[in-house]
Amino acid sequence: MSKENVFIGSLDQGTTSTRFIIYDRSARAIGSHQVEFTQFYPKAGWVEHDPTEILESVRVCMAKALDKATAEGHNVDSGLKAIGLTNQRETTVVWSKSTGVPLYNAIVWMDARTSVICRRLEKDLSGGRTHFVESCGLPVSTYFSATKLLWLMENVDAVKEAIKHGDALFGTVDTWLIWNLTGGVNNGLHVTDVSNASRTMLMNLKTLSWDEHTLETLGIPIEILPKIVSNSEIIGNVATGWPIPGIPIAGCLGDQHAAMVGQACRKGEAKSTYGTGAFILLNTGEEIIQSKHGLLTTMAFKLGPAAPANYALEGSIAIAGAAVQWLRDSLCIIRSANEIEELASQVDSNGGVYFVPAFNGLFAPWWRDDARGVCVGITRFTNKAHIARAVLESMCFQVNDVLDSMHKDAGERDEAKNEKKEFLLRVDGGATVNNLLMQIQADLLGNPVVRPADIETTALGAAYAAGLAVGVWKNDDFFSSGVKPETATTFRPTLAADLRKKKVDSWCKAVTRAFDLADLSL
């Protein structure tokens, strides 16, 4: 293959936008396009997407990215070898096999409508909230796809009827996209990958197949579930009617797993992605570690049908960058997201203000769906710069909570450190362009934070997986290199240890104030 005429595409379908990026053989982006799509909030705590609008955003992004790359002189039409796909996880879609029409809007991962179902399961199951942890690594929670699917089965007549007549298909967003990209009603492929399947609460982590006992317990028919494949293999070809017909889909990973690949996280290494939420994963290699400190046990990646499965400990944070969007869109304190750094920099501390963004409850390590957002410590001294700084700090405190749990679960033997015996946190995602945020994070961790030159590692990881499957790259091309110091920016802690402890203790006190607020009167 000529290096000049080899390209890999990456479809990155996120919570608020869709992107398509085209990479050359040096993993350099040569064309991209991004489209935001509608967020629906039909009730407090409910979040939905229109699956059809997501499909259209994919079509637009593919076509525009191709146009841009071609305009730059790249012959993508003849050189595109494969595409990889990465997606928002847990978000649940059920559609008609015969018509291809969604039977309800997609229920988004952060949606909290299933809390009643979760309480019922906790009461009825012998193991309570942790009943399925041994098989799937996940607690009963509003977060995961299984409870969202149960809600659809219990509350949407069209879903009930379609299941009764054998016409229903279930999937997370990856499954919905692949089915449509490979033909839809005309023999579209109904598949998911091990990373997305691991977030449904239905896959057995040891066998990497649907857990029959779990399905029987929950009353979910296996016939509506997709086939599970690895993260790096040729799944099928894009059908006619799309901008890139005939191109193999050769990689598929949930967004946080793709970021692990994009960051080349080997055993003992961790990354934190700052997007709508924040997601911290520590690669535990081929060992499944059950958390005793509020974390999830999940897949990291499986890069090929015969490749070993790598597992991870994960801490998921529901609200990170979304809190900045809230400042912009709901409170109008800032006009654009990038203004928050300048505003927060106008003060040298939070002024005693702590913001807990429990808009839909708290995820790891607290797992309190009865929590709601609070801002404490407000005085007449408080101004909007203090609020902005408290919002940035809230992201970092939450990541710190998760990493503290990871250190306890993994211990010294399972964490990789550099030659200075420092634990490095790799970071990525749009919010990491904020230097103040990254410095606050290093200060609160007491460890260095490493930001790569290309912060969009989710799309890059999906491209790597696809390129690996079709022979464009080899495993060593990206995993042997680790952190590239010549292109990465490292933020080192400057905060004194005693002040760090005082701030963390204050944060923990603020978090407790957010508990048991879900039933406040309107």
Image (cartoon, rainbow, N blue to C red):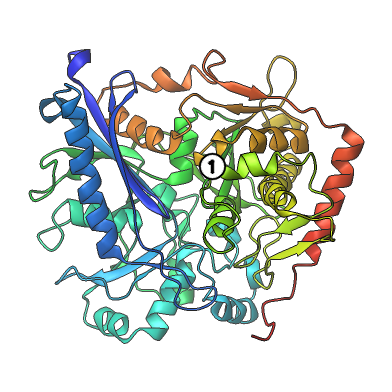
Horizontally, residue 496 falls left or right of residue 259, namely: right
Query: Residue 190, can we see it?
Result: no
Q: Position of residue 83 (x, y in %)?
A: 25, 37
Query: Residue sitting at 67 percent across and 51 percent down?
Result: 391
Most distant residue in the right direction: 498
Residue 468, located in which quarter of the rendered image?
top left
Which quarter shows the N terminus? top left
Disc count in the image?
A: 1
Q: For mark 1, does the 10 Å Cα neighbourhood hold few (<14), some (14 to 19), or many (20 or more) residues?
A: few
Query: Residue 161, can we see it?
Result: yes
Horizontally, residue 265 falls left or right of residue 437, namely: left
Q: Position of residue 457 (x, y in %)?
A: 45, 34
Tag 1: amino acid = Asn
Q: Position of residue 399 (x, y in %)?
A: 67, 45
Horizontally, residue 181 falls left or right of residue 201, namely: left
Residue 519, located in which quarter of the rendered image?
bottom right
Residue 2, above or below 96: above
Q: Position of residue 449 (x, y in %)?
A: 65, 29
Residue 49, above or below 504: below
Horizontally, residue 141 falls left or right of residue 348, namely: left
Query: Residue sitting at 28 percent across and 20 percent down?
Result: 25
Residue 122, located in which quarter of the rendered image?
bottom right
Residue 387, above or below 112: above
Which quarter shows the C terminus? bottom right
State the SS at label 1.
loop
Q: Which residue is mark 1?
A: 338
Query: Residue sitting at 40 percent across and 48 percent down?
Result: 194
